[in-house]
Amino acid sequence: MSFELAVSVNLKEIYQPIAGDLKAVEDLLRSSISESTNRSISALSDGLLESPGKRIRPALVLLSERAASGGDRSASDPRELITIAAAVELIHIASLIHDDVLDRAMMRHTRPTINAQYGDDISIVLGDYIYSTAFQLVTSCRNPDVFACMSEAVHLMCEGELLHVAQRGNLDLSKSSYIAIAKKKTASLFAACCHAGTIIGNHSRTIRTALKEFGLNFGVAFQIVDDCKDVLSDEGEMGKRPGQDIVARDITLPLLTVCEVLGQAEREEIRDMLGAGADQNSLKRLRAMLVNSNALSNIRKVVASYLNAARGHLDSLADSVYKQNLGLLVDEKAWTVI
């Protein structure tokens, strides 16, 4: 049993209309991270881009602006768009460095994490350094609305992560509180990516709001799927050891949903897992609970509701390949449990 995003197979196709811009973003990421003349900092930073993720966040900046303008490339300054797209990926990278410290994670994208290689102290400061590099890029655009958009997103991300960590081990957390945390710690940056693209293109408030809401709903769905993958995927699919959320005692929608649909005995069993420090046997047991109940069916419905809400916010946009490809990113059929 595996939980996988079929959409990731088609990301190359979805990104094709912005492939040149994404290449420019990648070049800017490399030059920004490796610009330090200090060899120690350069050595630490060199590996950060060796195993790139999906680059969904910079793609959202680019696709949102192009979709808002109906594909009219004269609507915005391409240099500013590429700069902000690189900045949001740096913000994401910095947040992952800090997350790996909090979770004591040893692997990410099949490579040892920074904290596994150099320890927590260096990881925390390197994450701060990458954040500061991101905001140097944001500031260079000299657009106060974009700066406000990005700074608000980072503030919400940090607040969400604080709430997330504070609720570790709390199986009494409500689903609404889980969603509120997911909106802050993950979806806020998705929303900011889409919003920033429309700000750079100087689009109407209606269009800005529509794409910001698109990103917010997409981000919640993305977080829920990520939480499910932590339980159901194997190490080869994830590029890191599964079950890290359980080991860290993080409260996720899979846990809350299993507790909701199963009996008191299973709920207490999960509580004991979290209290004792879950291991791989606990993970297998939790997988069985998910697979052999209607928990996954309930989670699918939640994911579908957020994907459908995201897609609905595209209705006000003119037809274009960019709008079409944003729609493909939130296609319900692409988010399947196999």
Image (spheres, rainbow, N blue to C red):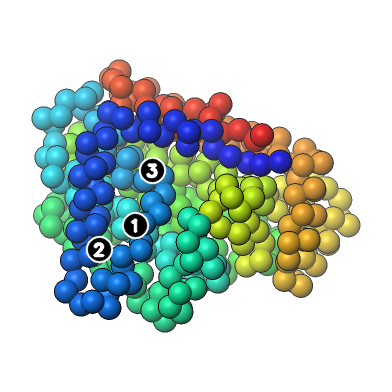
Q: Does any portion of residue 87 appear in the rendered image?
A: yes
In the rendered structure, find residue 261 and report the number of the disc placed on it.
none
Examine the rendered structure and indicate whether residue 56 appears above or below residue 335: below
Q: Residues within 10 Å of mark 3 (few under 14, many from 20)?
A: some
Q: How far is the residue under mark 1 from the one under mark 2? A: 9 Å
Q: Residue at x 41, y 49 (%)?
A: 53
Q: Quadrant of residue 202?
A: top left
Residue designated by label 3: 56
Image coordinates for residue 44, horizontal then vertical, percent = 33, 72
Q: How far is the residue under mark 3 from the one under mark 2? A: 19 Å
The amino acid beneath tag 2 is Ile
Quarter containing the N terminus = top right
First in sequence: mark 1 or mark 2? 2
Furthest toward the top, the residue is 319
CB contact under 8 Å: marks 3 and 2: no
Q: Residues within 10 Å of mark 2 (few under 14, many from 20)?
A: many
- Residue 65 placement, left or right of 242: left
Q: Nearer the viewer, mark 3 or mark 2?
A: 2
Residue designated by label 1: 49
Image coordinates for residue 148, horizontal then vertical, percent = 24, 55
Report the number of numbered marks.
3
Furthest toward the bottom, the residue is 121
The amino acid beneath tag 1 is Leu
The amino acid beneath tag 3 is Ile
CB contact under 8 Å: marks 1 and 2: yes
Residue designated by label 2: 33
First in sequence: mark 1 or mark 3? 1
Image coordinates for residue 242, horizontal then vertical, percent = 63, 56
